[in-house]
Image: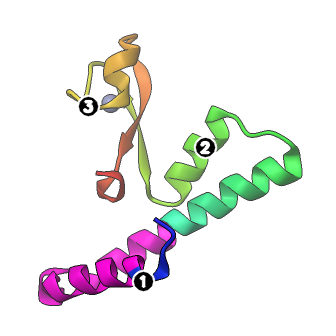
Amino acid sequence: MTDPEAILKLYTERSDSLDASSYDVAGLCRELIACRAFVIAVIYTAALDGYIDDDDIKSFGVEHGLLIEAEVTESCGQGCMCEEAGAFPMTCFKKTAVLK
Ligand SMILES: [Zn+2]
């Protein structure tokens, strides 16, 4: 959607239906800042090093509060990334509330 009038109309309609009192604005700001810091770390690493690997991404996720690193001997449950790996014991990078 690139029509500015249509975007403004959609934004206005959605803004009218929002109940700001039901949102934890400070919490949302912290999550946004964490996500922004993560993206900046990924982009700068890729730009400066010329590459980025999965260990870098997981490390940045932990550093910025998006992931929690934990040694597990069995699956954390359905939906966790260790569920697919299935080789225990292993290091699991659990999603924090920011990613849920
Ligand atoms: Zn897990």
The residue type indicated by label 2 comes to Ile
Where is mark 3, residue-wise? 79
Q: Main secondary structure of the magenta part?
A: helix
Give the mark nearest the N terminus, 2 or 3. Answer: 2
Mark 2 surroundings within 10 Å by alpha-carbon count, few (fewer than 14), some (14 through 19), many (20 or more): some
The residue type indicated by label 3 comes to Gly
Q: Which is more toward the observer, 68 or 51?
A: 51
Give the mark nearest the N terminus, 2 or 1. Answer: 1
Where is mark 1, residue-wise? 5
Q: Residues under labels 2 and 3: Cα distance?
A: 19 Å
Mark 3 surroundings within 10 Å by alpha-carbon count, few (fewer than 14), some (14 through 19), many (20 or more): few
Where is residue 64? Give x, y as percent.
52, 60
Helix, strand or loop at label 1? It is helix
Where is 35 relative to 19, above or below?
above
Helix, strand or loop at label 2? It is helix
The residue type indicated by label 1 comes to Glu
User: Which span is picked out in magenta?
Assistant: 6-34
Camera-near label (1 vs 3) is 1
- Indicate the quadrant of ligand 1 in the picture: top left
Q: Residue at x 26, y 22 (%)?
A: 75
Circle on res. 57: 2
Please state if 45 lies on the left or on the right of 7 as rendered.
right
Where is residue 34? Give x, y as percent.
49, 67
Where is 21 relative to 49, above or below?
below
Q: Residue at x 67, y 53 (%)?
A: 42
Where is 56 relative to 16, above or below?
above
Where is residue 54? Give x, y as percent.
62, 33
Q: Residues under labels 2 and 1: Cα distance?
A: 38 Å
